[in-house]
Amino acid sequence: MKTLKIALLSMVSVVLFTASTNQIQELKIGDKAPMTAHKVQDVSGRSITLAEVAQQNGLLVVFSCNTCPWVMKWEDRYPDMSRIARANKIGMVALNPNEAYRTKGDGMEDMVKRAKKMNYDFVYALDKNHEIADAFGASRTPHVFLFNGNMELVYVGAIDDNANDASAVKEYYLKDAMEQMVGGQQLTKPTTKSLGCTIKRIS
């Protein structure tokens, strides 16, 4: 009987957590960026907002972390993303929403070490209690959101079509989106499927 009660409680917990997760809706193309005045702490110790990171032509938000194998696969693309964003006057920020993993490699101290090791030249900040990720409807790491100069969402999804091999990429989803947006063109692919590890949320 005791074993049955434990099993039932576990099932209820899973159902409740799944239900709460399913209520999180990904932003739609054209939606305004939420929580742009919400302060987050970056690896330099600064308190900064998305509005402060944004530049003339927009903002690139990447939900990322230290521990996800998918992030590690795509991380060699981060310098190019930063370079292209900077060249096109687009601010870039990576947010770590893995609240349940703060003591398992995704705490601020770990983030500081990661940013130094990988030579991040963009803002890397902690999304406490995954509040911004929840507002964006982000589900995975990495999960990319690109906003124009009016802070309207123009692209959401993956970085490109090949996480495993940068030299074998055929479709540069994010690069094309940034260049088309700044060039005033209609985006060929405003949405793609994000692939990665599920964000480690707390229930």
Image (cartoon, grey):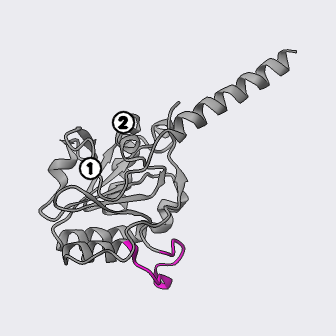
Residue 81 percent location from the top left of the image: 31, 70
Secondary-structure class at tag 1: loop
Q: Position of residue 141 (x, y in %)?
A: 47, 54
Residue 171 in the magenta stretch? The answer is yes
Residue 23 in the image: state x and y as whole percent: 50, 38
Question: Which residue lies at the image location 23% right of the left edge and 41% below the top edge?
Answer: 45
In the figure, 139 relative to 7: above or below? Answer: below
Q: Which residue is mark 1?
A: 33
| Sequence order check, earlier mark of 1 and 2 | 1
Q: Main secondary structure of the magenta part?
A: loop
* Residue 147 horizontal/vertical position (percent): 26, 59
Q: Which stretch is magenta? A: 161-173
Q: Which residue type carries mark 1?
A: Ala
Q: Which residue is mark 2?
A: 128
Q: Hey, which residue is sitting farthest right in the picture? A: 1
Q: Residues within 10 Å of mark 2 (few under 14, many from 20)?
A: some
Q: Nearer the viewer, residue 65 or 198?
A: 198
Q: Quadrant of residue 118?
A: bottom left
| Furthest residue in direction top, as rendered | 1
Q: Is residue 94 left or right of residue 100?
A: left
Q: In the image, what residue occupies the spot 68% across and 26% down?
A: 12
106 drawn magenta? no
**Circle 1 Cα neighbour tier, 10 Å, few/some/many (<14 / 14–19 / ≥20):** many
Q: Is residue 101 left or right of residue 51?
A: right
Q: State the separation of the CA atoms marked 1 and 2.
A: 18 Å
What residue is drawn where x is 16% and y is 61%? 149
Marking on residue 157:
none
Count of residue discs: 2
